[in-house]
Image: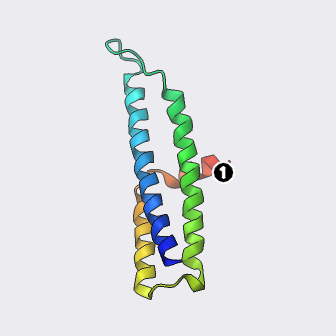
Amino acid sequence: MESEVAAAIRELGKLADRIAATVEWDKLAEEQHGSPSLPPFRIREHYRQEILDMYWEFFQLRNQLQAMLNRVDIGGTLEQRAQWRRELASIESGIQHIDQIERYIRG
C-alpha cells in the first residue's frame, strides 16, 4: 500500500504540472485571440475541454489518494503519513482556484 500512495502522489503531481502547462497555453491563446499581427489559435476550445478533463481526473485521483491516506492499514510510519499529507496539500495548493473549479465541474 505504501508504494501505491507514493505512486499516486507522483501521478497527481505530474497531472498538476500538465494542468498548469495547458492553462498557460490557453492563456496564450486568449491573449493572441484578438491580435491582428498573429494568426488566431484554432485550438482554444480543445484546450478548454482538455483542461476540464484534466481537472476531473485530478479530483478523482485526489479523492482516491485521500481515501488511501485515511485507511488504517496503509502502512508507513506516522511521519511518513504526515509527509504524504504535506505533499498532497502542496500539490493541491498549486492548482489555482481549485475549489471554484471543483464546484463548477460537479455542477
Image position, residue 23 (x, y; %): 43, 40
Query: Residue 53, how many percent across, how many down?
Result: 57, 44
Model colouring: rainbow
Residue sticking out furthest to the top: 36
Q: Taking 21 as reference, is 46 above or below it?
A: above
Q: Which residue is situated farthest in the right direction here?
A: 107
Give left or right: position of 75 versus 25.
right
The answer to which image quadrant residue 29 occupies is top left
44 or 73: nearer the viewer: 73
- Seen at 56% across and 60% down, the residue is 61
Q: Is residue 28 above or below residue 33?
A: below
Q: Nearer the viewer, residue 72 or 26?
A: 72
Residue at 40% of width from left, 34% of height from top?
A: 25
- Count numbered badges in the picture: 1
The residue positioned 31% from the left and 12% from the top of the image is: 37
What amino acid is labelled 1 in the image?
A: Arg
Does any portion of residue 6 appear in the rendered image? yes
Answer above or below: position of 72 versus 107.
below
Q: Could you tell me which residue is drawn at 54 percent across and 28 percent down?
A: 45
Instruction: Name the quadrant of the N terminus.
Output: bottom right
Residue 95 in sight: no
Q: Position of residue 75 (x, y in %)?
A: 51, 85
102 sits left or right of 42 in the view: right
Q: Secondary structure at mark 1?
A: helix
Q: Could you tell whether 25 is left or right of 48 in the image?
A: left
Query: Label 1: which residue?
Result: 106
Is disc 1 surrounded by few (<14), some (14 to 19) or many (20+) residues within 10 Å?
few
Kindly give the residue lying farthest to the left in the view shown. Answer: 37
